[in-house]
Each structure stands twice: as C-alpha cells, then as structure tokens.
Amino acid sequence: MREIKLTTGAPVELDGDLLTVLESLYKEISAKRDLDHSFEDTVREIQNVIDQMDDAERKQYLSESLFLNFVSYENERLGAYMRKLTKKA
C-alpha cells in the first residue's frame, strides 16, 4: 500500500478503498474545521489527492467513485418513487 499526504500533512493510505480516502478528507476538511470550509477548500484538497495518484490508482478510484455515486443516485430515485407510492395510498 502506498501512502500520500493531504495538504494538512495527514497521511492517507491508498489501499483501493474509496471510503478510506473519503473518511480522511472528512476528518481533515470538515471535522477539524468544525464544518467551516468552502467549496474551493474541498476541491483543492481533492485535486491534491488526485495529483498524487498514478494513472492506475486514478482509474481504480474513479471506478469505485462512479459505482458509489450510481448506487446513491439509484437509492434517491427509489426513495422518491416510494414516497410517490405512499402519497397515492
């Protein structure tokens, strides 16, 4: 496993698990700043992570990210459909 660093110096293991990266980002960007961060802060930190990855790591994490986003999108759509059904009943 390879380790990279966030701009805060916090280490992040690139172990192939997107949730590990997301948790590290959350802790450093949101939690340590008491949710006081901007869109630009978040984009800058994510870009920093991407810049440290090689092409294979980028491909792996993009694939996992798209899958996670698809599942989230699917759940939102199903939730909306279920709310629509319960209103009709």
Image (cartoon, rainbow, N blue to C red):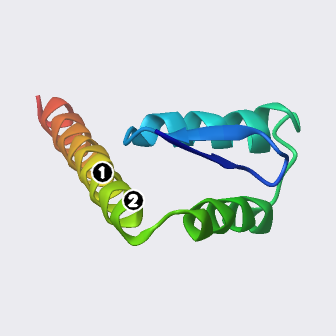
The image quarter containing residue 66 is: bottom left
Q: Is residue 40 above or below residue 1?
A: below
Q: Nearer the viewer, residue 89 or 44?
A: 44
The image quarter containing residue 46 is: bottom right
Mark 1 vs mark 2, CA separation in Å: 11 Å
The location of residue 70, given as percent across then percent down, is 24, 53
Front tag of 1 and 2: 2
Q: Nearer the viewer, residue 41 or 14?
A: 14
For label 2, the residue is 57
For label 1, the residue is 64
- What amino acid type is highlighted by mark number 1? Glu
Q: Quadrant of the C terminus?
A: top left
How many neighbours does mark 1 have within 10 angstroms: few (below 14), some (14-19), or many (20 or more)? some
Q: Is residue 47 above or below residue 9?
A: below
Seen at 58% across and 33% down, the residue is 23
Q: Nearer the viewer, residue 78 or 48?
A: 48
SS under mark 1 = helix
